[in-house]
Amino acid sequence: MFYRIYIDNVKRMSHTILSQNEIEYLNTQHIARIATVSTSEDGNKLMQPDVVPVGFDFDGEYFYVSGMNILKSTKYKNILKNKKVAVVIDDLRTVDPWDPRGIRIYGDADVVSRRGGYMDSTGHSEHTYIRIRPIKKWSWGIDEPVFTGGKFSVKRAEVEAG
């Protein structure tokens, strides 16, 4: 069983950058992709971004991702040095006609211990999660058609400073 947010709780959170439809969409999805990158020790070396598929939870404020061997994973090691991450959750509503939909998140990550997340349903007792606070988001094909007037329609939002 996957643990998903309760929509009523999110309505009370005034600082969310996600619409009600986007939250409902997230509740139908089980796989995301997270991109991380380390920082260079000497500041001159170019670093290789790392992107991996992950399960996720969203509690109305934070995204949580983990894994079977998270403490040994590249994503975990990267965020210890660089808290900036990107997450994508997407799918195809239909192939014909082409109808993609999804959400891309930029955020800050940290490491937390938590119980009651999706890892509890995997048979592994991992309680270490990467917690992601969304800062910016882009979405398509959720609140409105993905193609409007022959153009790709993207909805953007950002957390307000302060």
Image (cartoon, helix red, strand yellow):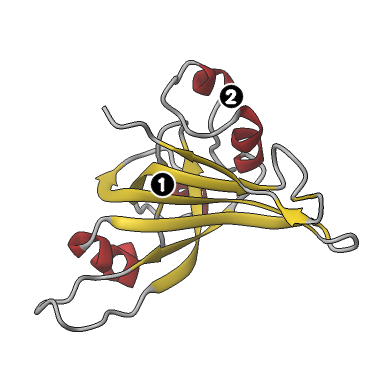
Q: Position of residue 69 (x, y in %)?
A: 35, 66
Mark 1 or 2 closer to N-term? 2
Measure the alpha-carbon separation of dots 1 and 2.
17 Å
Image quadrant where residue 99 sits: bottom right
Q: Is there a contact, CB below 8 Å, between mark 1 and mark 2?
A: no
Label 2 sits on residue: 7
Residue found at the very far bottom of the displayed protein: 45
Kind of element beneath mark 2: helix
Query: Within 10 angstroms of label 1, few (less than 14), some, or many (20 or more) residues?
Result: many
- Give above or below for 15 relative to 66: above
Q: Position of residue 28 (x, y in %)?
A: 67, 43
- Give above or below for 98 relative to 115: below
Residue drawn 13% across the image and 76% down it? 43
Residue found at the very far left of the displayed protein: 42
Q: Position of residue 84 (x, y in %)?
A: 30, 56
User: Who is closer to the viewer here, 102 or 146?
Assistant: 146
Query: Looking at the rendering, in which quadrant would you find the N terminus?
Result: top right
Label 1 sits on residue: 64
Q: Position of residue 112 (x, y in %)?
A: 26, 45
Kind of element beneath mark 1: strand
